[in-house]
Image (cartoon, helix red, strand yellow):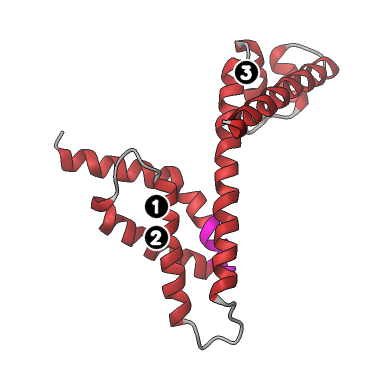
Amino acid sequence: MSDNANRVDEFVRLLAQNQRRLFVYVHTLVMNHTDAEEVLQNTNLVLWREFGTFEIGTNFAAWACRVAFNQVMAWRKKRQRDRLQFSDDFLTAIASEAHDANGALEEQTQALAGCLAKLPTDQRELIRLRYSEEGTIEAVANRVKRTVEATYRALSRIRHTLHECMTRTLARENRA
């Protein structure tokens, strides 16, 4: 496969991986769902056009959020005729808060993935069953051939284990 095809594949992978996060970020700044979709489309176009400047291996989400912020600012300039406009300082503060929240969410997601990987296979399967589409306690209990009460207790112990693991992991990361 050519280098160009590899870069295209990498762009598509990174964009797909971060699309929801970008939408949430833009929506916190724009507030209107339809406008957020419009800004996100423009952001995606700029990301595609400028992907050649992105350094593979660096933080795609941070880069994409900077591009999105610039697109929000451009969108705001076009919409200055609207009656309700927040100041640029206010919008910058909200963008910073949203970016920080995304970073914290990413840390928590990584910690949870690491903690789930440490669970024994049967406990991971129980969690997977519980949080899948038809993951009612009753359905899980039937599937694993346990009583509802026993399933509930097992899930409660697993959640407690995950909580402790995540607390330790995040505390260790925050010290580093």
Which of the 4 image quarters holds residue 49?
Answer: bottom left
Disc 1 vs disc 2: Cβ atoms closer than 8 Å?
Answer: yes
Q: Which mark is residue 133?
A: none
Kindly identify the residue that appears in the image at 43 percent across and 81 percent down: 78
What amino acid is at disc 1?
Trp
Which of the 4 image quarters holds residue 168?
Answer: top right
Q: Which residue is mark 3?
A: 124
40 left or right, relative to 127: left
Judge whether residue 55 is colored magenta.
no
Residue 25 position in % (x across, y down): 53, 57
Q: Which residue is mark 1?
A: 63
Q: Earlier in the sequence, mark 1 or mark 3?
A: 1
**Which secondary structure, mark 1?**
helix
Kindly identify the residue that appears in the image at 40 percent across and 54 percent down: 64
Q: Which residue is mark 2?
A: 67
Most foreground residue, 94 or 154? 94
What's drawn in magenta, residue-wise? 24-33
What amino acid is at disc 2?
Val
Disc 3 vs disc 2: Cβ atoms closer than 8 Å?
Answer: no
Dot in front, 3 or 2: 2
Task: Measure the alpha-carbon separation of dots 1 and 2.
Answer: 6 Å
What amino acid is at disc 3?
Arg
Q: Quadrant of the C terminus?
A: top right
Task: Measure the alpha-carbon separation of dots 3 and 2.
Answer: 38 Å
Kindly identify the residue that appears in the image at 61 percent across and 22 percent down: 115
Most foreground residue, 2 or 110? 110
